[in-house]
Image (spheres, helix red, strand yellow):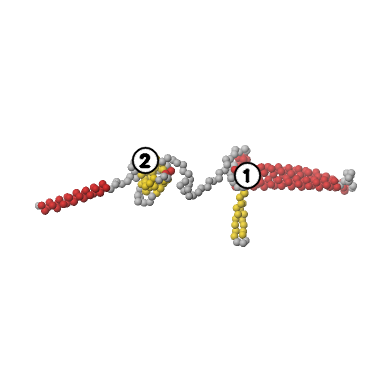
Amino acid sequence: MKSTLLPLKSVWLSVFLLVGLISFSNAQTPPPRKPDVIIMRDNSKLEVLIQEVDENVVKYKKLTDPDGPVFSIRKTEIASIKYGNGEVETFEAVLEVPGYYSPSQPTTPASQAAPAPVARNKSEANLQTLEPDRLRTIYKYYKSKSKAGMVMGIAGTSIGTLVAAIGTGIVTSSTDANGNYNSYQDQQRAVTGAWMMIGGFASAVTFGTVGFIKGGKNGAKASRVKRELLRRREPLQINFTPGFNVMTGTANLALKVTF
């Protein structure tokens, strides 16, 4: 009878020890961590395991992959964080400067055009709506027309004055000291010279006036287009000049920008 009770006591003692060990082990094992919820500014939510909250970014791991890689998200994109322990942290909206988080990449500020002045007429208002390439084409057109008008005015004035001077010389040479004609031919020459004088002066006045007026008007139009281009800080002309180096046997393309 005694030999039967002894093994039974040993069994019960082993069971109690095993239960105690299991309870102690469970007491030492921490409960599973509750997920953290990141609420984005677009109201979307991310359930993650946050690893670190830095000055600029929040580092986290995916809830489905707690042993996986660490991801990061900028704090400027986060509205608030609800931690697994119940705490809530809210982030204020901050205006983010482009390239702030990558200072190693220098940024060059783009040149900005001066504010457009109030258009005085329909023509100036139309210029302010045109593209730079179209403005350069118009500038070249009016510039060439202005040069042509000035050439016409100078040439007309010069040639007319020259013809009038020749006519004056012919009239003067056709008469003697007393102003009389020595022959009928001299009289005819004097008439021709007089017509040359009249025609020369008329041509000088007509072509000179028309040419200078056209040159002035087209020059004023070119100046208005030029002011618009300069206001936008655009070059007036862009020319590509091909070239070839005979010594090296290489071709090149030169870019010329005229302001």
In 3D space, how far apart are the residues under numbered discs 2 and 1 (Cα atoms)? 60 Å
Q: Determine whether 195 is above or below 249 in the image.
A: above
Quick one: label 2, few (<14), some, or many (20+) residues within 10 Å? few
Question: Is the residue under label 1 in contact with that under label 2 (CB below 8 Å)?
Answer: no
Tell me residue 197's x, y (percent): 81, 45
Tag count? 2
Read off the residue under disc 1.
Answer: 226
For the residue pair 190 and 234, the one nearer the viewer reads as: 234
For the residue pair 95 and 225, the one nearer the viewer reads as: 95
Read off the residue under disc 2.
Answer: 88
Going 76% across and 44% down the picture, which residue do you hit?
Answer: 204
Describe the element under mark 2 as helix, strand or loop. Answer: strand
Looking at marks 2 and 1 on the same chain, the residue that comes earlier in the sequence is marked by: 2
Name the amino acid type tagged 2.
Answer: Val
Q: Is residue 108 visible?
A: yes
Q: For this view, does 190 lie left or right of residue 62?
A: right
Tell me residue 38's x, y (percent): 38, 43
For the residue pair 182 and 234, the one nearer the viewer reads as: 234
The quarter of the displayed image where residue 243 is located: bottom right
**Nearer to us: label 2 or label 1:** 2
Going 55% across and 44% down the picture, which residue do you hit?
Answer: 112
Going 89% across and 47% down the picture, which residue do you hit?
Answer: 183
Tell me residue 90's x, y (percent): 39, 40
Name the amino acid type tagged 1.
Answer: Lys
Tell me residue 203's x, y (percent): 77, 44
Q: Is residue 188 visible?
A: no
Q: Residue furthest left?
A: 1
Q: For this view, does 40 lie left or right of residue 251?
A: left
